[in-house]
Image (cartoon, rainbow, N blue to C red):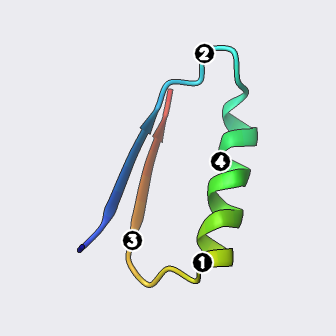
Amino acid sequence: VDAIFVNIFGGIMRCDVIAEGIIKATKDLDLKIPVVVRLQ
């Protein structure tokens, strides 16, 4: 895997909360590949 692409439509969920969760998960997993996230 060269990169991870994530596309999230926030809807009823606040996108900043989702972004904080993704950041925490990537730090906890110690990912070495790029993660590209699109929040809408």
Dot 2: what SS?
loop
The mark closer to the camera, 1 or 2, is 1
Find disc 4 in the rendering and name its residue: 19
Outermost top residue:
12
Residue 9 image point, x, y percent: 50, 24
Find disc 2 in the rendering and name its residue: 11
Q: Which residue is nearer to you in this view: 34 or 1?
A: 1
Disc with the residue nearer the chain's start (1 vs 4): 4
Dot 1: what SS?
helix
Disc with the residue nearer the chain's start (3 vs 4): 4
Disc with the residue nearer the chain's start (1 vs 2): 2
CB within 8 Å, label 1 to label 4: no
Q: Distance between the residues labelled 3 and 4?
A: 15 Å
Q: Which residue is nearer to you in this view: 1 or 19?
A: 1
Q: In this view, does 23 lie above or below 27?
A: above
Residue 30 image point, x, y percent: 58, 83
Find disc 3 in the rendering and name its residue: 34
Mark 1 crowdedness (10 Å alpha carbons): few <14, some 14-19, many ≥20: few
Residue 6 image point, x, y percent: 41, 46
Disc with the residue nearer the chain's start (4 vs 2): 2
Amino acid found under the numbered disc labelled 1: Leu
Q: Is residue 35 above or below residue 32?
A: above
Q: Is residue 10 above or below residue 6?
A: above
Disc ID at residue 29:
1
CB within 8 Å, label 4 to label 2: no
